[in-house]
Structures are given as structure tokens and as C-alpha cells.
Image (cartoon, grey):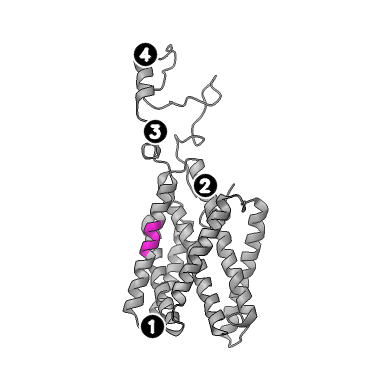
Amino acid sequence: MRSSNPVFSREGSFTREPGYAGFGTSGQAGAPYGNPYAGTQYAQPQGQGPLTDEQLYQMYNGPSAGPAATGRMTLDDVVARTAMTLLTLVAAGAVAWFALPFENYGFAIAASLVAMVVGLVASFKRSVSPPLILTYAALQGFAMGAWSHALNTVLNGIVIQAVLGTAAVFGAMLFAYRSGRIRVTARYQRIGLAVGLGFLLLMLVNVVAMAFGANLGLGSGPLGIVVGLVGIGLGAFFLSLDFAAIEEAIAQGAPQRESWRAAFGLTLSLVWIYMEMLRLIAILRGDD
């Protein structure tokens, strides 16, 4: 199933290289599934008889072609790249936290805008670019660190609460997906994306209204709480799309470098959930 996650859904995502099962390997005449050893040292030349004893010995006693030998993407690759991306994000956030005065929003706004541009370039770039992904993580982490420091100064402990809330959402979604309680079907994707589009349009209207001095009440009160819960729910929805895309890519033998794209998608979803969690907790604590 093709994912609707903006990172994974574009043409060319999880690119497939010739030689992987099901990708670019054509079956030979008389062999419905092709020669599994075509192009290797075990390939049987046209017109020759059965394999010799020596060839059979090499075939059955040679090393197995695991992920490291084939260059295919594995779950370990995704975990490692995601850890690298998140560590970069956290390190940049720590720099902003300790280096910037909490009332100085200029650098945070600039870093956030540049991160958005870099993220869009990384999303729509045909080939995977680890430097772009790590650059996005650093810029986004810097912006998040500055905002988090400012909020934590006013509402002490809100950052820890948001981090724990984000981890809880991630763990719950992973459990729900792995246990089969959530299935990423075409209908599920359509409904989630429709809600997401409506949410983004509402946020855009709110920004325009704030620019003209109007207040729609989305940042406080019961309406703000509902909007915050919907935002977190959308982040959880994006995570389920990430999980489905990663599972499909591994099953279909995507190249190992595509694990960077998977890490990028997971990072985007986690950043979304964390920021929405911060906003919701700030509303709840502000109403106390």
C-alpha cells in the first residue's frame, strides 16, 4: 500500500534498485519466478547441464546473503538513522536552551522558517540526502529548544511533561499498529488526510486572524483544548502511516539508504506531536 505521508508518498520514495526480489529482475523462459542466482557466481550458463558437485558445495556452504550483503533496508537501519536524527535535534535544542536568552525569539523564528524550507526540499528531493535531513533536524531542534525554554520559564516542568506525553503517544501507536488494532487501509488514510487538511486550513485562518488583531479562541479555553487534542491525534495518525510505509519498504527490499527517509518521516511526526503537546499542556495549565 502506498503511504499518504508527505515524505513517503511522492514518486521515487523508497526507490528500488535492480537485483532486489521483485524489482528489476525478469524471469527467464521456462522458469516462472526467474533464476534466483542470476547475476551471481551460482548462475547456470545457458546450454549447460546440471550444476557440478563443486558448484553445489559452494552454493550450500557459502555465506548467507543477509541485509549487510544485499544492501537492503532493515529495521535496525531505521532505528539507527532515527536515533542519529533525534540526537542531532536534541543537541541543537540544548544549544538554543543554554545559549539564547529565553525572551529572544528572533533566532528561533529564523531557524524555524529555514528548517521548514530545508524540510520541504528534503521531502521532495528525488534521492535521499542525509546531510539535508540532519540539517533540518539541527535547525528544527534549535527552534524547538528556544520555544521550549521560553515556555518552561513561564510554566516550569512543561517540557518534561511534553516529552513524556510524546513518548506515550509513540509507544501507544506502535503497540496499536503492531498488535493489529490499527490497520492502515485506503479508507483510514482518506479520513485522516481529510481531517489533517481541515486542521491545517483552520490553523492558517487563525494565523491570518491574529495578524489582523482578531482572536478565534484556538489558543485557550475549551475550543483550544479540542484543537490541541485533534492536533495530537493527527500526529499519531502520521506515525501510523510511517509505520506502514517502513514495514512495506522492508518487505519489498528497499535499498539501505532509504532508512534515512524513514527516519526523516518519523522525526517529522514526533516533532508535530511534541509541539502540539506543548500547546495543549500550556492551555490546560493556563486555565488552572
> In the rendering, at what x and y percent does residue 2 appear?
58, 49
Q: CA distance from mark 4 to mark 3?
A: 21 Å
Q: Can you say whether 149 is above or below 238 in the image? A: below
| Residue at the bottom extreme, as displayed | 213
Say the numbered circle drawn on residue 65: 3
Mark 1 lies on residue? 102
Q: Which residues are magenta?
A: 83-88
Mark 2 neighbour class, 10 Å CA radius: few under 14, some 14 to 19, many 20 or more: few
State the predominant SS element of the stretch in magenta: helix
Say the numbered circle drawn on residue 15: none
Q: Earlier in the sequence, mark 4 or mark 2?
A: 4
Q: Earlier in the sequence, mark 2 or mark 1?
A: 1
| Residue at the top extreme, as displayed | 49
The reply to whether the C-beta atoms of the residues labelled 1 and 3 are less than 8 Å apart is: no
Residue type at numbered disc 4:
Asp
Mark 4 lies on residue? 53
Q: Residue at x 54, y 54 (%)?
A: 175
Q: Residue 87 colored magenta?
A: yes
Q: Can you say whether 160 is above or below 236 in the image? A: below
